[in-house]
Image (cartoon, coloured by chain):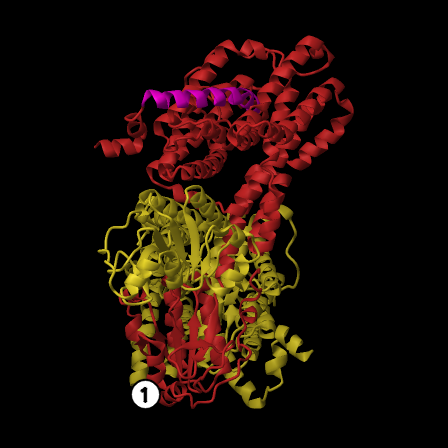
Chain colours: A red, B yellow
Amino acid sequence: MLRTLSRFFPVLEWGRDYRASTLLNDSVAALIVTIMLIPQSLAYALLAGLPPQVGLYASILPLVAYALFGTSRTLAVGPVAILSLMTAAAAGRIAAPGSEAYVQAALILALLSGLILLVMGLFRMGFLANFLSHPVISGFITASGIIIAASQLKHILGIEAHGHNLVEITHSLVIHLPDTNLPTLVVGGGSLAFLFWVRGRFKSLLKGAGLSEQAATILARTGPVFAVIAGILAVWSLGLEDRGVAILRDVPRDLPEIGLPAFDAQVWRQLAGSAALIALIGFVESVSVAQTLAAKKRQRVDPNQELIGLGAASLAAGVSSGYPVTGGLARSAVNFDAGAQTPAAGALTAIGIGLATVFLTPLLFYLPQAVLAATIIVAVLTLVDLKAVRTTWRYSKSDFAAMAATILVTLGAGVELGVTTGVALSLFLHLYNTSRPHFAIVGQVPGTHHFRNVNRHRVVTSPRVLTVRIDESLYFANARFLEDTIYCILGARPDLEHLILMCPAVNHIDASGLESLEAINHRLKDAGVTLHLSEVKGPVMDRLRRTDFLDELSGHVFLHQYEAIRELDFDTARGALEDTARTTEPGGDPCPSQELAGLARLE
Amino acid sequence: MLRTLSRFFPVLEWGRDYRASTLLNDSVAALIVTIMLIPQSLAYALLAGLPPQVGLYASILPLVAYALFGTSRTLAVGPVAILSLMTAAAAGRIAAPGSEAYVQAALILALLSGLILLVMGLFRMGFLANFLSHPVISGFITASGIIIAASQLKHILGIEAHGHNLVEITHSLVIHLPDTNLPTLVVGGGSLAFLFWVRGRFKSLLKGAGLSEQAATILARTGPVFAVIAGILAVWSLGLEDRGVAILRDVPRDLPEIGLPAFDAQVWRQLAGSAALIALIGFVESVSVAQTLAAKKRQRVDPNQELIGLGAASLAAGVSSGYPVTGGLARSAVNFDAGAQTPAAGALTAIGIGLATVFLTPLLFYLPQAVLAATIIVAVLTLVDLKAVRTTWRYSKSDFAAMAATILVTLGAGVELGVTTGVALSLFLHLYNTSRPHFAIVGQVPGTHHFRNVNRHRVVTSPRVLTVRIDESLYFANARFLEDTIYCILGARPDLEHLILMCPAVNHIDASGLESLEAINHRLKDAGVTLHLSEVKGPVMDRLRRTDFLDELSGHVFLHQYEAIRELDFDTARGALEDTARTTEPGGDPCPSQELAGLARLE
C-alpha cells in the first residue's frame, strides 16, 4: 500500500529519512538557487512577452508541486528559455503581447501542457518522447538559442523589433537600428561583457585564488545577480531612466492569484497543439537533465513518474498566474552543486521566491531591461552547439539532414514548424534507410559448414540451389524490396530449381513480410522453383506456425543451412566440405540494390 | 545509348522482335479485353459519378501511353473500381456530380496524379509505396469494396441515395427504400443472380463440358457482356424505360477531345492531396498485379519504370477527357489468359474501344443502369477479403490494429481519411514496437566460450562484471530505452565495476544511439563503473571510428565476449571454462521492460 502510494508520491519515500542535517543542506542550496532564480525568472518572463511578476509566480507553486510528485532529488523546475520562446510564439498567434488575452493564453498553455503531461504519465506514455531524435532536439535547441539571442538584441540596443523567426527579427532589427539608444547600449553591452567575463576568466581567477571547482562554478553562475545590482545602481544614480533606458518599474508585490483561466473552447483548441509540443519538449529537456544528475549519485529517475511531476508543476503554474515550466539545466546544476539532497530544496526555494516577491520587488524598480536581456543572451548562447552539427555531419548524413532541416526551418519559420519538420523527416529517413536491408547471396566456405557472401569470399555455390541471406527483420517498409530482390535474382537464373532464404538475422516478420513470403512462394512455384527457409529463429517460427504459410510452402524449413544444401544438392555440399569442389570468384551482384530501389542509401 | 533509351521507352526493346505471330496473339487478346472493357468502362464511369463516355475515353489514349512506357507485357490499364470511388469522393468535395466542374475535377485528378507518378518515377521514388503496409492496403480495399457495393444498391433498387461512406449511404438507402422501383429491381436483381451464377456454376459447367480452365475463365469473365445484351433487349422489347427503369440514353459518338483542363490554382491545390493518394494507391495495386503476372513467365517489372508508364497513362487520361486510370486486376488477368504477348495488345485494345465508341454506342441507348450496377457489385465483392482480417488477427495484433482502423475509418469517414489513418497507425505501431528492443543480461555457459541469457540458462556470472546483450540496432526510438535499462541495472548493482555491452546483433547505430552510448559512458564514469563493448560488427566499428567516442570510452572494445571476461575477471572466466565456478539460477529480471517503458509490447 505504502509502496504504491510512494510511487505516486515520492515524497513519502524520501520524507521518512528527513533529518536536521538534510534540512540544512537543502536550505543552503535553496538560498543559492533563489538568488540565481530571481533575475532569471524576470528575464524569461520578458522573453515570453509576459509581465515580470509572471516569471516569479511560475517559480513558486510549481516548485512545491514538483517537490511532491517528482522523482529527481536535485532537479530545479521553473521558467526556462526554450519554453518561454515557445510560449511567446504560441500566445503571440492569438493575442498581442502585453494584452490580457496574451497572459490568459500563457496560463492556458501551462494548464494544457500540464494536463497532457499528467495523462501521458498516468497512461505511462513516456515512450512518445522517443519520437524526438537527438539530432532533432539538438538542432532545435541550437536554432532556438540563436532566435532567442537575436530577439533580445532589441533590448540591448533600446529599439523596437518583433518576429518569431530569425528572418523577421533580423529584418525588424535592421529597420530600427538607426533608433539605437546609446545609454541603453552602454548598459546592455557592459552587462554582456561582464557576464561573459564572469563565465570565462572570472571562474579561472577564482580557481586560481584557491577556490574549489564547485564553489567557483556556483559563484560564476550567480554573476547575473551582480549585473542586476550594478544595473539598478547605475540607472538610479545616473538617472539613466530619463535618457531612454527601459526599466522594469513597478512589479506588483502581491502573491499569485489562484484560479483557473477563462474557458473558451476555440482558444483552447487553437492552443492545444502548441501545448502538446511544449509538454513534449519540456519533458525531454527535463528528463535528460534529471538523468544526468541522478546518474552522478547512482540514483534513478522514473521517466513516467517524471511526467506526473512535471505535469503537476505545469498545472500549478496554470492555476497560479504562471506560464509553462520545466526542469532547467543551469539552475538544476547549481542546486546539485550547492548540495541539495531532496526535493524539499525546491519547496524551500519556492518560499524564498515568495518572500522576494513580497519584499524585494520594490528594489527592482530601476532594473534595466537591457541587463535582463544580457543575462538571457549569455545563458542561451551556451545552448548553441555548432560542434554537434559538424560531428553529426561526419557521423551520419541522414541524421545530419534531420538536424539541418530542424535548424533551418526553426530559424526561417519558427519553433513549431521547425520541430515538426525535424520529427517527420527523421521518421521518414529511418523508414527509408531500413526499407532496403542488406541481402547477400551466400555459398559454402570450402572445408567448413559455414556460408558466406559470394561477393566477399571464395565459396562453393550450387548451379541448382541458390541461397539468399537476409540481414534484417522483415516488415512493411522492406517487404516489397524482398520481393523485388527475389524476382530480380530469379530473372537472372532461369536454370534455378531451389531457392533458400537464410534467416539467422530476422528478428521478426510482420503481416506484410509474411504476405511477401507467401507471394514469393506462389510465384516461385508458378515458375517451377521450390522455396525453402533455413535458420529461422524460434519466436519467428512460433508465429509462422499460427498461419498456413508452412503448409503452403513448396519446400522445407531447415534448422541449419548446411543441412539444407546437403539435402538439396548432396554432391555440392559434400564436395565443398571435402574441399574438392570448384569455388566461385567473388563477383558482381546480379541485382544491386540501387537498381532495385531507385536511390542509394543516404550514406 | 539504345540501352538508356530503351529503359525509358521499353517499346524499343520488345518492338524489335515483333513478328506476325505476336501480332496475331496480341490481336486475339485485344479483342477479348475490348469486349470485356466496354461494359466495365461504362460502369466505372457511373460509379465515379461521370458521364458514361468518360469511362470509354479513359480506355483509349491511356492504353496507348502505357504501351509505350510500361514494363509489364500483359498489364491492362484503364478505369478501376477503387480509383473511381476515390475520384468520386475527391471531385464530390468541390462540385456536384453531373456538373461541368465535377468532370473538370476528375480530369485535374488524372492530370495531377499522372504528374505525381511521373515525378516519382523520374526521381526513382517507388519506395514511397513501402509506407503502405499490406494490412492497410488489404483493409482499405475490403472497406472500399463494401462502400462501392453499398453505393450501387440504389441503381439496383431504382432509388436515390448519396454519400461517400457506409454510414451516409446506408442512411440514405433506408430513407428512400419505400421508393423502390419494381421493374428496376427485377432487372438489377436478375443481372446480379445471373452474374453470380456465371462466376460460379457456369464456369464449372463449362469445364465439365470439356473446356480448358483458361477458356472457361475467359468466358466466365465476359459474363457482363451477356448481361448487358440481355438487359438492352429486355428494356427495348418490354418498354421498361416507361416503367421507371433508368437507362444510359445517348452516349456521344465523338472521340475524346484533346486539351488541358482549365487551370484554377485554388481547385488544383484542393485536389493535390487526393491526387497523391490516387497515384499511390493506383501504383501499389497495379505493380502488385503486374508482378504477379510477370513472375508467371519469369519476366520482370521495374517498379520505377512502372511509375513512368502509369504516370504517362494518367496524364493521357487527363488530356483526353478521361479520369484517373491504373492497371486493373480482372482485365489484366483476362489479357494474360487470352495470350497477350506484348504491350501492343493494349494499343490494339485502345483501337477496339475507339471503334466501339464511334460505332457501338447507339446500341447502348437502352442499356439499364441496374445492369451496370450489378456488374460493379459482382466485381467489387471479390475484393472484400474478410478471411484476411481473421488471419491477420491470428498472426499479429499490431497489424490487425492497423487493418481494423483502416477498415473502420474508411467505412465510417471515407476513403481518404481511412487510408491516411491506416498509414499513420502502422508507422506508429512499428516505431512503438521497435522502441523497446530485447535486452538480456548474459553469463558464461560452464565449460564453453558461449554466453547466454541469465534468465533462461544456468550460467556463470561475475560479481564485478555485468554483460548486457542488445538484440537490435540502436536508433532514436530505442536509444533512451537503452539508457533507462542501463541506469536501472546500475541502480540495482551498487557494487559493479565493469559493464560490457555485447553487440553482435547491432546492425547500425544512428546519431541518437551514439549520443546514448556517450551519455552512458559519462554517467557510468561518474559512478565509477567502466564501460566496455564486445563483438561490435565491422561496419558499425568503422563508423564509430569517425567519432571521438572510442577515445572517450572508459573501457575497451573486445572482439570476443570471452576475451572481455578473461581480461576483466580472470578467475570467473577460468572457473567457468573449467566448470568449477558456481552457476546462478535462472532468475527474475531486475529491470523488466514493462517497468521501464510503460506499456508492454502490443503482442
Magenta residue check for B323: no
* Residue A35 among magenta residues: yes
Q: Residue furthest right?
A: A178
Residue type at the position of mark 1: Gly
Residue A84's place in the image compared with A552, above or below, is above
On the image, the x and y values in percent for residue B97 come to 51, 51
Mark 1 neighbour class, 10 Å CA radius: few under 14, some 14 to 19, many 20 or more: few
User: Residue A174 appears at what percent x and percent y?
Assistant: 75, 31
Rendered residue at 44%/36% (across/down): A293
Q: Percent x, y for residue B248?
A: 47, 62
Instruction: Return the chain for callout 1.
Output: B
Task: Name the quadrant containing residue B246.
Answer: bottom left
- Please say whether residue B160 is visible from this viewpoint: no
x and y percentages locating residue B233 in the rendered image: 41, 71
Q: Is residue A466 above or below residue A271?
A: below
Which residue is tagged 1? Answer: B210
**In the image shown, does A585 or B369 lie closer to the viewer?**
A585
Report the front residue among B205 and B82. Answer: B82
SS for callout 1: loop
Q: Is residue A573 left or right of residue A139?
A: left
- Name the residue located 48 percent from the left edge and 45 percent from the top edge: A132
Main SS of the magenta part reads helix
Q: Nearer the viewer, residue B392 or B75?
A: B392
Image height of A558 relative to A99, above or below: below
Q: Quadrant of residue B324?
A: bottom right
Is residue B179 among the parts visible in the rendering? yes
Q: Quadrant of the N terminus of chain B?
A: bottom right
- Report the front residue among B458 and A134: B458
Q: Which residues are magenta?
A: A19-44
Q: Quadrant of the C terminus of chain B?
A: bottom left
- The quadrant holding residue B580 is bottom left
Q: Residue at x 48, y 72 (%)?
A: A485
